[in-house]
Amino acid sequence: MAQIYLSDLEASVPVPLHTLIGFQRVRLGPGESKTIEFTVTPEMMMLFDDEGQQRLEPGQFRLSVGGCSPGARGRALGAPQPVSAVFTVIR
């Protein structure tokens, strides 16, 4: 299973370290690879500010794709390192 996580690296308020925004079951044989596609929407990147208003802040985000959440616990249990990319939202 491919799990897709989003991290807001510059949030102005406390936010989760990693938020699951999607997943897709992928069956692979030995040595096989597969391309998956998914869409990240602005709503997926929104946070709730101190006034309780939902908004999208500009800044850097990290997208991670792997078999489990991108934290140290998964790696400690033997999961491979997720693939990650950082991108910037400009307003």
Image (cartoon, rainbow, N blue to C red):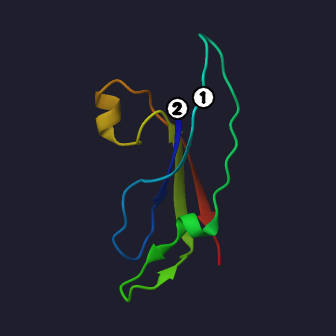
As drawn, 5 above or below 81:
below
Q: Residues within 10 Å of mark 1 (few under 14, many from 20)?
A: few
Comparing 63 with 51, the one in front is 51
Q: Which residue is mark 1?
A: 26
Q: Residue at image x 57%, y 74%?
A: 58
Question: What secondary structure is marked by label 2?
Answer: loop
Res. 1 mark: 2
Instruction: Work out which residue is located at the far bottom of the displayed protein and give it.
Output: 51
Res. 84 mark: none
Question: What secondary structure is marked by label 1?
Answer: loop
Q: Position of residue 27 (x, y in %)?
A: 60, 22
The quadrant of the rendering that contains the C terminus is: bottom right
35 with respect to 15 (left or right): right
Quarter of the image where one finds residue 50: bottom left
27 with respect to 19 (left or right): right
Comparing 42 with 86, the one in front is 42
As drawn, 59 above or below 87:
below
Quarter of the image where one finds residue 12: bottom left
Real-space Cα separation, disc 1 to disc 2, in angstroms: 5 Å
Question: What amino acid does circle 1 point to?
Answer: Val
Q: Residue at image x 60%, y 28%?
A: 26
As drawn, 33 above or below 91:
above
Question: What amino acid does circle 2 point to?
Answer: Met
Q: Residue at image x 68%, y 37%?
A: 36
Q: Mark 1–mark 2 contact, CB under 8 Å? A: yes
Q: Position of residue 87 (x, y in %)?
A: 61, 58
Mark 1 or mark 2, which has the lower sequence index?
Answer: 2
Comparing 40 with 61, the one in front is 40
